[in-house]
Image (tube, rainbow, N blue to C red):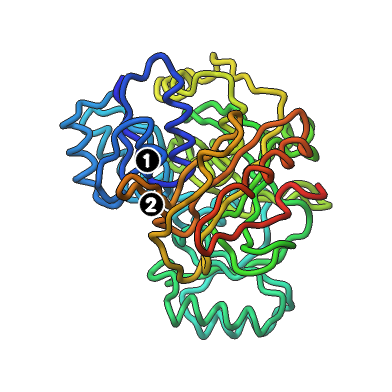
Amino acid sequence: MKVMLVGGGAREHALAWKLSQSPKVEEIFAVPGNAGTALLGENLPLSTSDISGLIQAAEERRVDLVVVGPEAPLASGLVDELKSRGIPAFGPSKKAAEIESSKVFAKELMQKNGIPCARSKSFLSFEEAETYLKSQSAPIVVKADGLAGGKGSIVASSLGEALEALSRIMRDKIFGSAGDRVLIEEYLQGKEASFFAFADGENLTPMIPACDYKRALDGDQGPNTGGMGGYSPSEFFTPQLSAQVMEKIMRPTLEALEGEGRPYKGVLYAGLMITAEGPKVLEFNCRFGDPETQVTLPLLHTDLVDIIQAVLDNRLKGVKIEWSSEFCVGVVLASGGYPGSYRTGFPIGGLDSLDRDVLVFHAGTRREEGKVVTSGGRVLTVVARGKNLAEARAKAYSNVERINFEGCFYRRDIALRI
């Protein structure tokens, strides 16, 4: 098979790494890819937003499968366009992807179908949102309705902070048109976890749960990011809790989408808060997570291509998916200033000094004059496996310390004190 992988982050490098292990895969094209995916196949210099260019590339190279990593091309209807040309594509349709591309749509779907989630109200008018917000108490959550690269949900610890967030989203347009509409949502307390399931439109098979760290700094301080690290599995996520999430959240959501004429195929990802009242949905995403993919795929024993083909052929129910009993910890190395402004083009040292069994998934990297240099905010995810979380964590950080580039920073509390 020839496989085209859309995306250029560490999630896509992890997907390329896993796909390359399949005896069915002969060639991988990554669009646009990074210095890591270039070691596994050919990078194609196209934008993930160039739908016609992506389709043309798939047709010219006669690919047998397209795997879409990021949410934006899914929300733009890339899968629909590929399928209309007879090219198999893994990921939900544009209508099904609205579960992520519109937080208001997702919230209304959950409320209509009794799926547990935080109470909220949506607003198109800044003045109405401001008036409502002034009648609430903190902490409180302000969310941009549309896609914002994982940074559109702001947890405000005071009303002043919430009002500032509202102004930045709706007036300053820090997330562009994604902030034309906002959700103001109650703050949920508990343990946060990411829950993933493969879906073929009718059936769901859960993946192992993971936890990620969204704030930039230790102790969950600093601004929201796309994710600064994670671990899997979550020790507190018992088989009983997993069964409850499947019964109360995942299956009803799949059925609700089917009922709306939006059958869902791909990976359905629920960001959860495990509250005293049970699990509640913080948000849904329409794809593999980042950085969760980097800490779950290394534990997957089953051929990923077999799973993808079962999803596309509506026969997921008959596939047994097997996982390792190990634990996995991933630490993201980022450019100084991320998620704000940052400089790039710095050589990355130490990549050849790492332990053989440690994985490094590239994100914001490119090859320049024979050297790997930084080219983005999140640069690398260093991933280690172990017989328990403590062992995996110690191994990951031991290797993180061997990597260096100007401005490099990372959280030092990933998988600590779980």
Instruction: Report the front residue among 342 and 74.
Output: 342
Q: CA distance from mark 2 to mark 1?
A: 12 Å
Let me know if residue 114 appears in the view.
no
Which dot marks residue 21?
A: none
Q: Position of residue 145 (x, y in %)?
A: 48, 64
Tally of marks:
2
From the viewer's perspective, is 27 left or right of 216? left
Q: Residue at x 60, y 68 (%)?
A: 223
Helix, strand, or loop for circle 2?
Answer: helix
From the viewer's perspective, is 128 left or right of 16? right
Q: Position of residue 3 (x, y in %)?
A: 32, 27
Instruction: Report the front residue among 135 and 195.
Output: 195
In this view, 293 is above or below 118: above
Q: Dividing the image into 4 quarters, which one contains the N terminus? A: top left
Please state which amino acid type lies under the numbered disc 2.
Ala
Please state which amino acid type lies under the numbered disc 1.
Ser
Query: What residue did someone put label 2 on?
Result: 72
Query: What residue did someone put label 1 on?
Result: 93
Q: Residue at x 33, y 31 (%)?
A: 41
Please report whichever mark, 2 or 1, sits nearer to the chain's N-terminal start: 2
Q: Position of residue 336 (x, y in %)?
A: 53, 66
